[in-house]
Image (cartoon, rainbow, N blue to C red):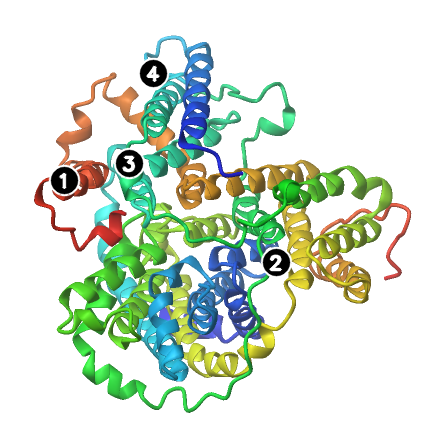
Amino acid sequence: MQLSDRVTGGVLVILGGLAAWSGSRLPAVPGQDVGPAAFPMLIGSGLVICGALIALGIGRSFEVPEEDATEAAAPRFHGLRALIPPALLLFYMLASEPLGFLLTAAIIVLIGAVALGARLTLAVPLALAAPALVHLAFYKLLRVPLPDGVLPAPW
Amino acid sequence: MNELLEAVRLVAAPDVVIAIIASAIYGLVVGSLPGLSATMATALLVPVTFWLSPIAAIATIITASAMAIFSGDIPGCLLRIPGTPASAAYTDEAYAMTRKGQPEVALGAGLWFSAIGGIVGTLSLVLMAPLLAEMALSFSTFEYFWLAFLGLMCATLVARSSPIKAIASMLLGLLIACIGMENPAGTPRFTFGLTDLLGGIEPIPALVGVFAVSEVMRAMVTAEPPKLPHRKFGSILAGQWKLTKTYQWPMWRGNFIGVIIGVLPGAGADMAAWVSYAMSKKFSKTPELFGTGHPEGLVEAGASNNASLASGWVPSLLFGIPGDTITAIAIGVLYMKGLNPGPTLFTENARSMYALYLIFIIANIIMIPLGIVMIRIASKVLRAPRASIMPVILLLCAVGAYATGNNLFSVLLVGLFGILGFVMDRNGYPVAALVLGIVMGTMVEQNFITSLIKSDGDVMPFFERPVSAVLAAMTIGALLWPLGVWIWNRTGGRRLPAQGAAE
């Protein structure tokens, strides 16, 4: 995920340009000079300038390089593991209504723990206990309507 | 006086007392775990505050954040891993003291001077807020625009990263705040036809994503921190009175700087710690001892970051402009509980304000005994494997985001903001600036556009009123500060001492 400043700066230039362009196409309020378009255009232009400066490497002297050597020896697709948490959140969004909170949460905790290197003797009890506790706290105490799905909670 | 008694009664209510104790323990534990920051601890508390009474809700936020800022010093001191960004400034120093065999002195200094800083910060809040409230009553949209803009600029003066990247992060936050129809004209913008985006991006899912999910993602790709060796500590507070007397002057300077930085909208505890540490080294009689396990910098920076925490509530309570990411969350809770920030809060709702001051003082006093217990059991708490904590945090992120609006779309947003925060952090873009941009975007735009409409598109009125002229000068100063430092370094050759602030 370490990208060069050229890439991130370029992305910001494109994003800013798009924001300013689509902002300029917003309908104006009749009889007013400044409307909903002004702010996105201002921010978009600012992003274009900042992105260009970053791509040119200006301001680098202020940065302190991170002394993070723990990742250096990682195998090639190791970095993709970082996408596991967002993927699990996506899974929660899709599955929590059909499957129900308890089952979905148990799967998330199990996968998360195993991905972090937990042994099954730790991951399985955790996947059983944590969803139940969270459900009790949020459903009973905080009255959040967590979905029942196929496995309704016994309380 | 009646108001004060009323406030005591409010704080002594059983639910408030339980809230204070529970959130103190929660804050201490979460703050001490490496990677789980004070902001994240506070963000995950928000769904819980829905269910509490207004005073109890504020009590949880205040107590948990104060405790987490202190206990961030524990892993910093023992493992050289800062528990929260606010401890990063003096982690090396504290660890050097541990290696010299004085961990109890370093931890005790963190605890004792955190508590003093917190109390001084609270007193400054008590003194300053009503005075400023008088002034704030005469503020118009011009002043509010400059205040909010100043807050955004201060948020970009983050330690150790490029100011241009910080400004870019802030602009990105403002752009995200443009999404939806919460703008002066009520026109839907950047919604891509999704009804879920019409209401805009809520700050809480963004905060949880950027601060919590990205941390779980980082845990996936980094090695587990080393286990803490079990050790016996000597008396924790024994040497502190001597330190207080020896370093009295640095301590007050730390408190003072912390208060000033806290009052500035947008600049928070981590900046206060960096500035104070650099300041301490600059003015010390023995600067060569810094970095070798010398308590002077710890005293000053430890006091400073907790002082800024309390005074950071000044702009939040008066103007609704967050002093840092923690108060950005607190403002949301204040609105939710009907305590809308603004100068009238101090006249119409004085007893709630007194209650808030009392909670601050109580939190900083109980920090000392609870902190000692925490230090003693730290080796056990830090032994909990990361693989068992992080999945639960992830689950809490999902449920917490869902609970803010009973909306599954928020869960997706949390995931997306997690990716954004992770990528930004990896590439040196400070995420705090992004978050403050998102939180303050609507306010900046509202005041900017209203002011422009009032002045018929003229820019001059932005500088004509006396207060707005001062605020404008401060904002432009903050904008040009990195440029000044850069030119100075180029021409003078001597590194500026305040580099720690702008670097």
Residue nearest the observer in this picture, A77 or A58: A77
- Read off the residue under disc 1: B490
Which element carries disc 3, helix, strand or loop? Answer: loop
Which element carries disc 2, helix, strand or loop? Answer: helix
- Read off the residue under disc 3: A59
Q: Which amino acid does label 1 sit on?
A: Arg
Q: How far apart are marks 1 and 4 (CA)?
A: 41 Å
Answer yes or no: are tags 4 and 3 on the same subunit. yes
Q: Could you say which disc has been placed on residue B48 in the image?
A: 2
- Read off the residue under disc 4: A34
Q: How far apart are marks 4 and 2 (CA)?
A: 41 Å
Quarter in which the N terminus of chain B is drawn: bottom left
Q: Distance between the residues labelled 2 and 3?
A: 41 Å
Answer yes or no: are tags 1 and 3 on the same subunit. no
Q: Within 10 Å of the Cα at label 3, are there few (<14), some (14-19), or many (20+) other Cα atoms?
A: some
Question: Residue A19's spot in the image, x, y percent?
Answer: 45, 19
Q: How far apart are marks 1 and 3 (CA)?
A: 13 Å
Question: Residue B76's spot in the image, x, y percent?
Answer: 43, 68
Mark 1 or mark 4: which is in front?
A: 1
Mark 2 or mark 3: which is in front?
A: 3
Which element carries disc 4, helix, strand or loop? Answer: loop
- Left or right: residue B202 versus residue B313 is right
Quadrant in the picture for residue B15: bottom right
* Mark before the other along the chain sequence, 4 or 3: 4
Is B446 drawn above or below residue B63 in the view shown? above
Q: Which amino acid does label 4 sit on?
A: Val
